Image: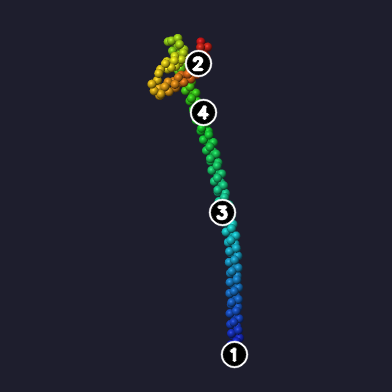
Amino acid sequence: MGTEETEHDKKKQASQKDRNQTLENLMSEIETIRVSLKKRKTDTTTLKILFYTGLAVLLLGFIYTNQTLQRAQHRNLESHISLLQGQVNQTMLLLEKKLHKEILDLDTKLKGTSSTSFHDRIQNLNNALDQLEPQATSISSLIERVKRTSSELSRLVEPENLEVEDLH
């Protein structure tokens, strides 16, 4: 019986030793897993920081680029507007000079055929319009508009007529 107990004790000790070894292996694996989880957690945190930093940089870059493009388009639009205004002004000046020349040419032609000046003819036109009795309000407004336009034309041409007369 003594040998059976010793064998049984040996088996118990061997089984205890195997259990201790298994427990140590499990503890070692758990520690390795804990270290791995801690490392992954810090890696994940680092990746999140990098991701959000990159996202913020991209967003700020987009906003800056958008504002820069808007400013450039605004400057381009302003320069185009200025260019168009210059062209319109130049065209208006050319038309004004051409019309003025035609008026002076007509006035010169008419002076040769009659003794009245351009200003007198405009005045005669206005007098004739005053004597008309319009039958409709549209005709009345048209007569008033012709009077205003002829008076304005007379004021514009009168200084040039004086210059032309001074030259002769």
Helix, strand or loop for disc 4: helix
Query: What is the secondary structure assignment of the residue under circle 3?
Result: helix
Q: Is residue 66 something that shows in the picture?
A: yes
- The kind of residue tagged 2 is Glu
In the rendered structure, find residue 115 and report the number of the disc placed on it: none
Q: Which residue carries the number 4 mark? A: 86
Residue 35 percent location from the top left of the image? 60, 65
Residue indicated by mark 2 = 158
Colouring of the image: rainbow
Relative height, residue 136 to residue 3 (above, below)? above
Q: Earlier in the sequence, mark 4 or mark 1?
A: 1
Give the residue number, with chain letter if any, for mark 1: 1
Closest to the camera, between mark 4 and mark 2, is: 2
Of the numbered discs 4 and 3, the one sitting upstream in the chain is: 3
Residue 107 visible in the shown view: no
Residue 54 percent across, percent down from the top left: 56, 51
Q: Which tag is nearer the camera, tag 4 or tag 3? A: 4
Mark 3 Cα-neighbour bin, 10 Å: few <14, some 14–19, many ≥20: few
Q: Secondary structure at mark 1?
A: loop
